[in-house]
Amino acid sequence: MNKKRLTIVLAVSGVIFGGVFGFVQFRNHMIKQYFATMPKPVIAVTADAAQTEQWQGSLSAVGTLQAVNGVDVSTSVAGLVEHIAFQSGQTVKKGQLLLKLDSAVEQSNLRSALADADLAKVSANRQRTLIKSETVSQSALDKAEAELKVKDATVAGHRAQIEKKSVFAPFDGTLGMRKVDLGQYLQPGQTIVNLQDLSVMLADFTLSQKAVEAVKSGAKVRMTTDAWPGRVFDGSITAIEPQLDAKTGMLTAQASFANPDAALRPGMFVRIDVLRDGARSVVAMPVSAVAYNLYGDSAFVIQDGPDGKSVRRQFITLGERRDGRIEILNGIQPGDVVVTSGQVKLENGSKVDIRQDDPLKSTTRR
C-alpha cells in the first residue's frame, strides 16, 4: 500500500515539475520571438557628407609664447621704498614713474658737492684773471681747472645716484602684481613688479631638420591654443636659429603674432602650423563624426534601404586635423554621409532619422 502511494506521489510530482519546466521553456521561447520580431527603434542623429577639399600643406609643431618685451622691473641700487606710483595690473607708458627710494642722504651729498664745485669754479676764475698779469704760474691755473672738473664730476655722480633712486617703466606694457611695500628695504636687483608688452607675442618652436628647406623667414604661420578653442591666430616666422641642436637635430624657429586684444599671454602652450607653398586634395569630414576606440577609429556611414535609412560602422584611417575637420586617409569616400552626433546609441544596422538640429540638444530642451 505504501509503495502504491509513493508511486502516485512521484507521478504527480513529475507531472507538476514537467508542467512548470515546460511553461518556463515556452515563456522564454515567446520572449525571444517577441524581441526577434520587435521593430528596431529609429534613432535621431545629425549628419554631414565627406567632401574633397584643397588643403594647404603645413608642418606642425608645439611652441611656447613669450611677450615681445618682458622683464622683472628692479632697482640697481639699495634703498628704502619711499613712494609707490603704480597699481597691480596697471597699463603704463615708457618712462612712467613706478617707484621712488629714499634719497635724503644722496641729496645732502649733492648739496655738499655743489658747494665744493662753486668754490672750485671761483678759484679757477681767479686763477684765469691772475694769469693775465703773470701773478700766478700756468701750472697753478691748470691745477685749479682740473680741480673744477673733479668737483663737477662729483656733482654729476651724485645726481646720477639720485636718479637711480627713481624707477621708471622701460617700455609700454601691462604690470603684474606688486612685490614690494612702502618702507621695505630693497637690495639691488630685487624684483619690484613684472612688466609685459602684450602688443606682439613671440612663439618659439622646434621642427625636424627635414623642414630646413621649407621653413623660411617670413613664412606664414597659423596658431591655435586650448585657451581659445576654435580661434586661429595668423602670424609669420621672424627668426630662425642658424645652428641646429647637435643632440636632437631639431631646428628652432620663432614666429610673431599681433595681439591687439591681449588674448594671448606669455607662457601659453600653442600648436603651430607652418604653411607650405601649394595645396593638396584631401577627403575631409567633421571631427565630431569620428568614434575613437582602442580597437580602431571608426565612423557611422548612413545608407539607404528598402525600409528607411540605417548605418554601418566603417573603420577609418585619420590624417591631419584642421579647423574642426579631419582628413580621412582610408575608409571614407567623397559624398559618404556620416553621423556627426548621436553615435552613442548606434550599432551596425541601426535605423536613423537625420535631424537638422542636434538631437542631444533637442532632448535636453524637451
Image: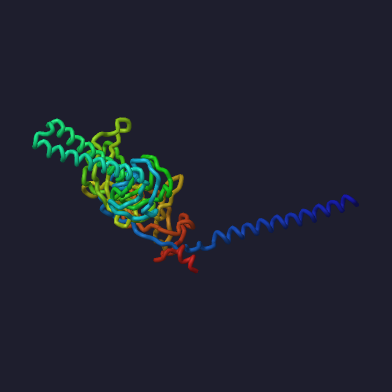
User: What residue is drawn where x is 32% and y is 30%?
Assistant: 247
Q: Position of residue 226 (x, y in %)?
A: 38, 51
Q: Nearer the viewer, residue 208 or 353?
A: 208
Q: Can residue 269 be seen in the rendering of this structure?
A: no
Viewer-proximal residue among 233 and 347: 233
Q: Does residue 157 appear left or right of residue 47 in this picture?
A: left
Figure colour scheme: rainbow
Q: Residue at x 29, y 30 (%)?
A: 246
- Using the image, determine if residue 100 lies above or below residue 355: above
Residue at position x 31%, y 49% from top?
A: 168
Q: Say whether residue 245 is visible.
A: yes
Q: Position of residue 250 (x, y in %)?
A: 30, 36
Vertical side of 364 occupied by 142: above or below: above
**Number of numbered discs:** 0
User: Which quadrant of the figure has residue 151?
Assistant: top left
* Horizontal side, residue 339 vs residue 33: left or right: left
Q: Residue 263, position in %: x, y? A: 34, 55
Return the residue found at the far bottom. 366
- Residue 137: where, in percent of width, then height? 12, 31
- Which of these two is toward me, 313 or 151? 151
